[in-house]
Image: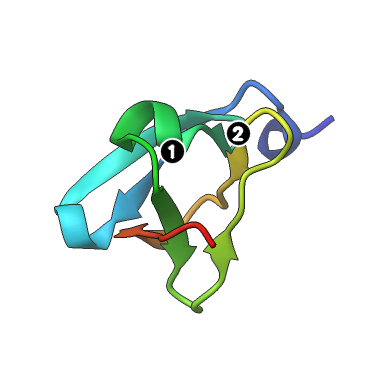
């Protein structure tokens, strides 16, 4: 197994509109625990990262994200 495929690998992604970074383990993060409800991450490419069953989203190393308010329907 290569170092890049280590599920416990720590890395940071940039949060462009907050001028900060978000540290993650293995690319999994829980935005609602960090930023509060009705907030989500959007990739630079425009993809809205929707949470999984447990509220998790998967980020990619080297990518930049925007934290934005979302309104549930």
Label 2 CA crowd tier, 10 Å (few <14, some 14–19, many 20+): few
Residue found 43% across the figure and 52% down from its top: 40
Q: Nearer the viewer, residue 69 or 28?
A: 69
Residue found 84% across the figure and 30% down from its top: 1
Horizontal arrangement in the rendering, residue 43 relative to residue 50 (left or right): left
Query: Which of the labelled discs sits on residue 14, or is there none?
Result: none
Horizontal arrangement in the rendering, residue 7 relative to residue 68 (left or right): right
Q: Residue furthest bottom?
A: 45
In the image, residue 53 sits, relative to residue 42, either above or below, namely: above
Residue found 50% across the figure and 78% down from its top: 45
Horizontal arrangement in the rendering, residue 54 relative to residue 19 (left or right): right
In primary-sequence order, the first of circles 2 and 1 is 1
In the image, residue 72 sits, relative to residue 28, either above or below, namely: below
Horizontal arrangement in the rendering, residue 29 relative to residue 44 (left or right): right
The quadrant of the image that shows the C terminus is bottom right
Instruction: Report which quarter residue 3 is drawn in.
Output: top right
Disc 2: which residue: 55
Residue found 41% across the figure and 60% down from its top: 71
Instruction: Report which quarter residue 49 is drawn in.
Output: bottom right
Disc 1: which residue: 31
Asked if labels 1 and 2 touch by Cβ distance under 8 angstroms, the answer is yes
């Amino acid at each position: 197994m290569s170092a890049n495929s280590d599920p416990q690998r720590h890395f940071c992604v940039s949060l462009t509109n907050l001028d900060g970074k978000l540290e993650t383990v293995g690319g999994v993060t829980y935005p609602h625990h960090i930023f509060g409800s009705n907030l989500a991450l959007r990739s630079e490419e425009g993809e809205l990262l929707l949470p999984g069953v447990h509220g998790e989203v998967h980020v990619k190393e080297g990518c930049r994200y925007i934290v934005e308010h979302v309104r549930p329907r």
